[in-house]
Amino acid sequence: MNQDLALKYQAFVDGELREAEARHVAQLLETDPEARALVAELRDTKTLLAGNEPQLPLPESRDFYWSKIQRDIQCLEAEPRSAGGWFAALAGWRRFLAPLAGVAVITFLAMVAVRFYSPAPVDYLAEIENLSEESTAYSFRSGNMFVVWTQDRDVTSDDSQLKFIDYNDAVAQ
Amino acid sequence: MATQHDNSSVSDEKLVKAAQRGDMPAFEELVARHRDKIYARAFSMMRSEEDAVDLSQEAWVKGWQRLKQFQGDSSFVTWMTRIVINLCLDQLRKQKRQRAESIESLEEDSGGVERQMPVVTTNPTAGLERQELRQRIDKALGQLSYEHRTVLILHEFEELEYKEIAKRMECSIGTVMSRLFYARRKMANLMASYKREEMS
């Protein structure tokens, strides 16, 4: 008898075969006395063990046995309170980590978007009223910087002057 | 202890509900009622009194911690038995990693040993008192390797199916089947040998 067939007989004893397989095994058993003997032994051993689990009394008194269990339970229950300190505080804050991380990511993305995708600041010629007929003035503002370019109308460009004026001062003037 | 006497006539179900509310004396009564069974199961698997006491106590502590998860789908003692079995399996795995393979394991690996054992045709336990029968079963269990003993305990005492045993023992169903087959055949032959010893 090969091992696979022997295991199939055992599965038959344990009710682990599907109906069709069980019927097939039952037919095999009718014609094989050796298999029948094996199945009988397996069945007897199963019956022998069922309901006859060894009963062993605990070799310790009720109070002594319980005292260790109680001590361990009390230690475990005391742990979360006594552990306190940093770990407990961190554990308490842990539930806020996910929403905070989300807010941080959104803020970062918003900053990146503003930085890279917003229209370039408008550098424009500021309206400087030039009452002089002898000079020309151009000005523009970039951020807080106010640039004024003045040039004498009658001289060459070498005489031109570049002045940096604080925007607030220029407005005040 | 007055509380122990107060709880002695209370049903398991009521004690469990009280313990789930944090009633420690109720839990202590449950421990007192079922400690022998939980210890016996641990001993059957571990074959060491010291390990069995330690693991059964650890199981009770775990039981207290997980008590709120107990829904009453099975009896309380069945639930506790599963906890102690899992602890024993973990411990046995640790021990196995630390020691060399047993002779039984080598026999299993070589294959076919169980097929060489003679089929036991007479009842080797006829006429035995139940207590004596249990002692012989215990003795025979002690002569099996932990893999064979465990599979036998899970199948015959816990009444678990092959698939469930495979999951708990972290092995294939085929391995469960071959271990169970070997364990049963060895068991039958050991019982027959005890009978022969008695007769001689």
Image (cartoon, helix red, strand yellow):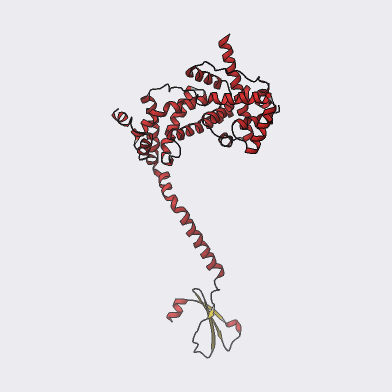
Q: Nearer the viewer, residue A30 or B177?
A: A30
Asked whether residue B5 is in view, the answer is yes
Residue at x 57%, y 24% (from the top left corner): A45
Give residue A9's position: percent from left, percent from top.
64, 30
* Image location (x, y in percent) of residue B143: 57, 20
> Is residue A167 found left or right of B162 in the rendered image?
left
Q: Is residue B155 above or below residue A127?
A: above
Image quarter hosting the C terminus of chain B: top right
Q: Quadrant of residue A21?
A: top right
Query: Which sits in the foreground, B74 or A9?
Result: A9
Q: Position of residue A8 (x, y in %)?
A: 65, 32
Direction from residue B119 to residue A112 in the image, left or right: left
Q: Quadrant of residue A112?
A: bottom right
Say which residue appears at 46% left-offset and 33% top-offset: B78
How many badges with numbers are in the image?
0
Q: Residue furthest top?
A: B200
In front: B38, or B98? B38
| Picture layout, residue A89 above or below residue A105 | above
Instruction: Find the residue positioned furthest to the left.
Output: B2
Where in the figure is residue B23, as x and y percent of width and height? 34, 37
The answer to whether residue B100 is seen in the rendering is no
At horizontal 60% and vertical 83% (from top left) the residue drawn is A157
**Quadrant of the drawing holding the N terminus of chain B:** top left
